[in-house]
Structure formats: C-alpha cells, structure tokens
Image: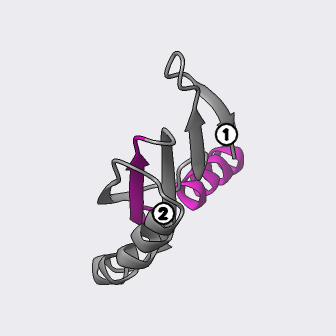
Amino acid sequence: MDSDNYKSLISNARDYCTPAWWIEIFTAQPKCTYYFGPFDRIWEAETAVSGYLEDLQSELAQGIQAQINKCCQPDLLTIEYDPSDNSPSQMV
C-alpha cells in the first residue's frame, strides 16, 4: 500500500470513529436498545436523557435503564430483539 492510500485509510477511519457522548437506553418491554447522540459534552447528554426517558415512559415501555458512554457512533441506532429467543429481529 502506498503512503497516499495509507493516509487516506487512516483519515477515513478517524472520520468514522470520532468518540462522542452517546445515550444508550435499554428497555425490557419491548426488548430494545436505543442510542441517542452524538453529544459534544457529557452535560449535554445528561440534560437530554430525561426527555428520551419521558418519551419511552409515555409509550409504556417497561424496565427502562439508561447510561451515557463516550464512544464511536453505533452502527445501528435502534435494535429490537425477538422476545422468543433474544436475537435481534429488527434493526434500524
């Protein structure tokens, strides 16, 4: 691989994976994982999380748990699991 291709590859990888703050919310019913973000600062995510929790509560989701992580953008922002075997059944 020549140096220009290598630099391009590194640059693309860096663009794809720029860590930011993400809210990760799990619900037991329906069994889903949701990602909200990115946020530049943790306090922005901390401020926003209550709105996402209220929305899920108004939709009667059960067993809601949230955490804030600094990570790269998830490949999927919503993952819905098949209740019969816990495998992902629908990914958005």
- For the point 59% across and 53% down, the residue is 77
Which numbered tag is attached to residue 67?
none
Q: Is residue 66 above or below residue 48?
A: above
Q: Are marks 1 and 2 in contact (CB under 8 Å)?
A: no
Judged from the image, the secondary structure of the residue bearing numbered disc 1 is: strand
Q: Label 1 is placed on what type of residue? A: Met
The residues bearing labels 1 and 2 have C-alpha atoms spaced at a distance of 18 Å
- For the point 40% across and 41% down, the residue is 28
Which numbered tag is attached to residue 56?
2
Describe residue 44's horizontal placement relative to residue 91 as left or right.
left
- For the point 49% across and 22% down, the residue is 86
Describe residue 12's horizontal placement relative to residue 32 as left or right.
right
Q: Is residue 74 magenta?
A: no
Q: Position of residue 26 (x, y in %)?
A: 40, 48
Q: Label 2 is placed on what type of residue? A: Leu
Judged from the image, the secondary structure of the residue bearing numbered disc 2 is: helix
Say few, some or many: other residues with alpha carbon within 10 Å of mark 2 (under 14 / 14 to 19 / 20 or more): some
Colour approach in the figure: one colour
Count of numbered circles in the view? 2
Q: Position of residue 34 (x, y in %)?
A: 50, 53
Q: Which residues are magenta?
A: 1-28
Question: Residue tagged by mark 1?
Answer: 91
